[in-house]
Image (spheres, rainbow, N blue to C red):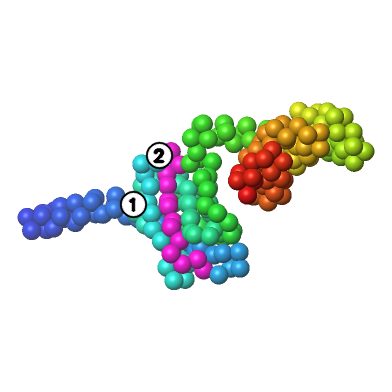
């Protein structure tokens, strides 16, 4: 069968066009979805980041429109996560999606009211270790809370009986279990004040204020101690 030169050239052109088109079509992967709040209302202008799970270098960003919708197309093959952020909300996460060229991958995300913060995969190892320590500390406090409360109550009873030295010993035992209790420090300071040990009382009020700087009563009591010590300007 004879093929003319013209037909041959056309065949080659069509073959090359198809060869180049196939990779482009293969890249036509789409991720789309809608971002809503806890009342199912669209979140407008939310930042949407589509990031490869194996490489932070492959990251694509877009924003939601007036209907809370977003769309991004043209991904290399692979696994991705979708992270959404908007003011007044906690970050939203679609942990895993594998876009393909046969149909769009739909990732609808609902945001909860709150503050922005780092997600676990965004944290450094040091930050993760610090969070673990805080969690361990919180768990330890939870386990010892009943004993701390018992010691604190015993101290209060002794203080009401004007047995201030004994009360202080109970408060100290409670603080050994949980040293970050401003209320215990404040009551211990009050006992020292009743014993006219004003400097000891002042030191404890300062420690308590560092733990709970928004407690007005601590400042008031500290002012009273300073006044007793003749430090009227500081007291005011």
In the figure, 123 relative to 166: above or below? below
Circle 2 packing at 10 Å, graded few (<14), some (14-19), many (20+), is few
Judged from this view, the residue extending furthest toward the left is 5
Dot 1 or dot 2: first in sequence order is 1
Judged from this view, the residue extending furthest toward the front is 230
Residue 102, horizontal then vertical, whole percent? 42, 56
Q: Which secondary structure lies at badge 2?
A: loop
Q: Which secondary structure lies at badge 1?
A: loop
Q: Is residue 30 left or right of residue 106?
A: left
Residue 61, horizontal then vertical, whole percent? 38, 54
Report which quarter residue 73 is drawn in: bottom left
Circle 1 packing at 10 Å, graded few (<14), some (14-19), many (20+), is some
Residue 213 sits inside the magenta stretch: no
| Residue nearest the viewer, comparing 35 with 188 | 188
Q: Is residue 144 left or right of residue 85?
A: right
Q: Nearer the viewer, mark 1 or mark 2?
A: 2
Residue at the spot of label 1: 27
Alpha carbons under labels 1 and 2: distance apart? 18 Å
Residue at the spot of label 2: 55
Q: Residue at x 8, y 58 (%)?
A: 6
| Residue nearest the viewer, comparing 43 with 81 | 43
Residue 154 visible in the displayed image: no
Residue 181, horizontal then vertical, whole percent? 73, 38
């Amino acid at each position: 069968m004879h093929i003319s030169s013209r037909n041959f050239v056309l065949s080659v052109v069509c073959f090359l066009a198809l060869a180049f088109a196939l990779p482009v079509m293969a890249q036509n992967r789409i991720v789309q979805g809608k971002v809503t709040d806890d009342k199912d209302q669209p979140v407008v202008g939310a930042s949407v980041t589509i990031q490869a799970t194996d490489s932070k270098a492959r990251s694509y960003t877009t924003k939601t429109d007036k209907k809370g919708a977003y769309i991004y197309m043209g991904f290399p093959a692979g696994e991705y996560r979708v992270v959404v952020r908007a003011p007044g909300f906690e970050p939203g996460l679609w942990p895993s999606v594998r876009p393909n060229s046969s149909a769009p991958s739909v990732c609808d995300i609902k945001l909860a009211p709150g503050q922005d913060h780092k997600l676990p995969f965004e944290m450094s190892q040091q930050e993760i270790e610090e969070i673990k320590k805080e969690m361990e500390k919180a768990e330890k406090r939870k386990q010892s809370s009943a004993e701390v409360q018992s010691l604190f109550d015993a101290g209060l009873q002794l203080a009401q009986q004007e047995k201030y030295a004994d009360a202080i010993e109970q408060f100290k035992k409670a603080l050994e279990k949980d040293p970050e209790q401003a209320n215990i420090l404040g009551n211990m300071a009050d006992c020292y004040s009743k014993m006219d040990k004003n400097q000891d009382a002042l030191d404890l009020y300062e420690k308590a204020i560092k733990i709970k700087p928004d407690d007005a009563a601590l400042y008031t009591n500290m002012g009273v101690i300073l006044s007793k010590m003749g430090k009227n300007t500081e007291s005011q």
